[in-house]
Image (spheres, grey):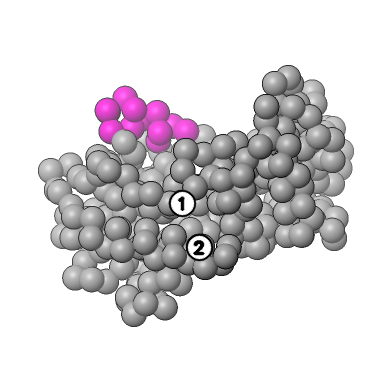
Amino acid sequence: MLYINNNGTVLTNEAPTIHAGNRGHVYGDGVFESVRLMNGVPINLDNHIKRMLEGAKAIKLRTPIYFNTAFFEERILELCKLSSISEGGRCRISLDRVSGGAYKPDSNDAVFFIEVYPYESNNFELNAKGLEIDQYTDIKKQKNFLSTYKTKSGLIYVMAAVNASEKNLDDVLIINDKGSILESSSCNLFVVSNGVLYTPGIDEGCLAGTMRMQIINLALSHGVKVYECTILPQNLLAADELFFTNAIRGINWVGGYRTKRYFNNMSRKFVALLNDHWENQLG
């Protein structure tokens, strides 16, 4: 049996757990984070909480001073214990504006919601078959002060994922109004050319992914050059590798973009570095 925490009330997830009028449900009025669990504990939680609280501030959510890493870690660990998750898992933390009002809220106070689920593996694993991808062009992602955060207004990502399914693809790439590639429906993008990593810059409008930053830091600490820059479709065709990063899945390598095929040497290297890093951190 799995458990959730609705703003301090612990319940099983087998029955309705959010209240009527929840603004995250009704208006997409909130921010969230997806956190990987290893050995039954959340990893990289500091960076997740930092981004979530910055996102809450950006949408004018008023959070209490005790909403910090230690506060959320204690509640995540409680849910993992109750849910018998002692190895791999995933956790979602949501901050919503408190119920009340219509588009104009009655209050800007925040409430939290935490849910946990088991995951099929404890360590990060590279996908056996490379992903097949293409571009998504029906909706362009607009750059604004919310672009880098995980808000609950996620229809562009839903529509991109639906588009990928309709085309029998594994994922599609989201672009901005200048035609620059930003990310996929659920991941950040890295391009590998001649042993150098390139990734769309935050100033292009992509999500400021926690795994994206972790891979950048791992690369720099192991002598691999990384450039945050504009990525255009022609750069994909000239690349040796493409891979996606995601807080839950870690790294997924791309096998093909249209007619172009790719290797996965760098992807395999970084999965190993990622697992080594967290094995050392967790003891």
User: In the figure, 109 relative to 264: above or below?
Assistant: above
- Residue nearest the viewer, comparing 216 with 273: 273
Q: Which residue is pictured at 56% across the width and 46% down the height? A: 87
State the image coordinates of residue 183 (x, y, percent, origin top left).
39, 51
Q: Is residue 162 magenta?
A: yes
Badge 2 is on which residue? 279
State the image coordinates of residue 98 (x, y, percent, origin top left).
82, 39
Stretch of the chain drawn in magenta: 158-169
Amino acid carrying label 2: it is: Glu
Query: In the drawing, does residue 56 fall left or right of residue 42?
Result: right
- Residue nearest the viewer, comparing 206 with 251: 251
Q: How many marks?
A: 2
Give residue 24's quadrant in the image.
top right
Badge 1 is on which residue? 123
Which quarter of the rendered picture does the C terminus lie within?
bottom right
- Residue nearest the viewer, comparing 227 with 117: 117
Query: In the drawing, does residue 178 fall left or right of residue 153?
Result: left
What secondary structure is found at the residue carrying circle 1? loop
